[in-house]
Amino acid sequence: MNNKGLSIKPASSSDEDILFYWRNEPWVVRGAMNQREVSREEHKEWFKETLEGQKRELFLLEVNSAYAGMIRYDMTSPMEAEVSIY
């Protein structure tokens, strides 16, 4: 999708580092369910499961070709998802 410099793309293996960085930003940690930073190993396993799994969709937002955020859908049932955005 592209609308006046906004792009949304599926996450790929090259996005792991930026997502790890964002996940441990203080304002993201405060909003997380467990309210703690994650280790590199925890994130690596979560990211691998995310890319290979069927119950989560992960997208990165770019504005004028610069990373700007992410949207994640965790399927809770066939017709429902929990949405995370930052």
Image (cartoon, helix red, strand yellow):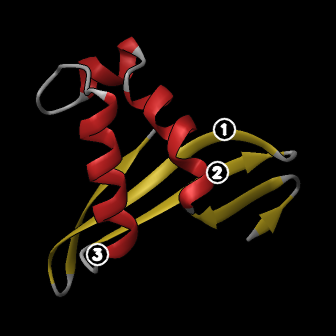
* Residue 78 drawn at (x, y percent): 17, 87
2 and 3 marks in contact (CB < 8 Å): no
- Horizontal side of 74 relative to 59 (left or right) equals left
Identify the residue at horizontal 64%, vertical 51% (top origin): 61
In three-dimensional space, the C-alpha distance between marks 2 and 3, rounded to whole angstroms, equals 21 Å
Q: Quick one: quadrant of the N terminus?
A: bottom right
CA distance for labels 1 and 2: 5 Å
Q: Amino acid at mark 2?
A: Leu
Answer above or below: position of 50 versus 85: below
Question: Residue drawn at (66%, 38%), measured in percent from left and top?
Answer: 68
N-terminal label among 1 and 3:
3
| Residue 57 percent coordinates (x, y) | 39, 69
Residue occupied by mark 1: 68
Q: Which residue occupies the extreme top position in the image? A: 26
Q: Residues within 10 Å of mark 2 (few under 14, many from 20)?
A: many
Disc 2 element: strand
Q: Amino acid at mark 1?
A: Ala
Outermost residue, bottom direction? 78
Residue type highlighted by circle 3: Gly
x and y percent of residue 71 in the render?
Answer: 46, 54
| Residue that numbered label 3 is attached to | 53
As helix, strand or loop, the secondary structure at mark 3 comes to loop
